[in-house]
Image (tube, rainbow, N blue to C red):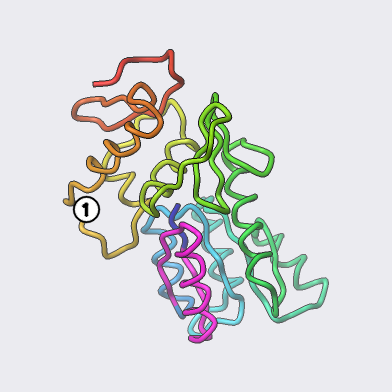
Amino acid sequence: MRLLLVEDDRELSQTLAHQLKKEGFAVDVCDNGVDAEFMGNEEPYDAVILDLGLPQRAGLEVLKNWRQKENKVAVIVLTARDAWYERVDGFKAGADDYLGKPFHFEELLVRIQALLRRNHNMPGDSIKSSGLILDEACQQIRIHGEDPIKLTGTEFRLLRYFMLHPDKILSKTRLIEHVYEQDFDKDSNLIEVYVRHLRKIIGKERIITRRGQGYIFVEPDVGESR
């Protein structure tokens, strides 16, 4: 899953980006409101972590402008302001969640994970699909109750995106946009390589190919692998 981190505190931004990448997210970083608004409208982020106290354009204005353009990207607001009415203003502007500074990274992480699962109609504390349980904390997959299998970072990000979007045609371009960061080469064939890896792990019948269109993550009895 791909995140946009908007934070003008360079030290905090670098620390959060590093930690989020370790947890299996592709992360783009921005330090001002003007660039943040543009990137949020142009790139297909799964969620945005948005500081309110930004230079050039305030975070609350950025958020309002996104919502006015019907940009529904999930947004977690970060702020050092603790007044209740400022939180209300944030939710009225379209925030999905709110986290006051200072905070523990673990709390931010579980809020991101819960928000993404909720937005994909997958309540609970894990991602599940007919015998598959994806452990986000350990980046492992458990198949039909057997011992968990450790995934590489790319395998984990790709499988998580597949499992959150079952039965949908996912083009190579769309997968790259959500699994990798902004400067990744979209002409790369790495998606095909990692799809082959995942088929060996979870079964080739789980991911079918639609020639000229992309891939579909399906239940074992739907479709045929190619």
Residue marked by disc 1: 186
Q: Quadrant of the C terminus?
A: top left
161 and 152: which is toward the camera: 152
Residue 135 drawn above or below residue 111: above
Disc 1 residue type (three-letter): Lys
Q: Is residue 41 left or right of residue 144?
A: left
12 and 168: which is toward the camera: 12
Residue pictured at 67% horizontal, 38% vertical: 123
Q: Quadrant of residue 144?
A: top right
Residue 101 drawn above or below residue 198: below
Q: Given the current orientation, which residue lies at the most extreme front position?
A: 147
Residue 145 drawn above or below residue 52: above
Q: Quadrant of residue 102?
A: bottom right
Is residue 24 inside the magenta stretch?
yes
Q: Quadrant of residue 125?
A: top right
Question: Bounds of the magenta span?
Answer: 4-30
Residue pictured at 19% horizontal, 29% vertical: 212
Is residue 167 inside the magenta stretch?
no
Residue 193 drawn above or below residue 98: above
At which x and y percent is residue 108?
64, 65
At which x and y percent is residue 218?
42, 23
Q: Is residue 172 left or right of residue 217?
A: left
Are there few (<14), some (14-19), or many (20+) residues within 10 Å of tag 1?
some
Residue pictured at 56% horizontal, 36% vertical: 133
At which x and y percent is residue 157?
42, 49
29 and 162: which is toward the camera: 162
Helix, strand or loop at label 1? It is loop
Q: Is residue 127 left or right of residue 190?
A: right
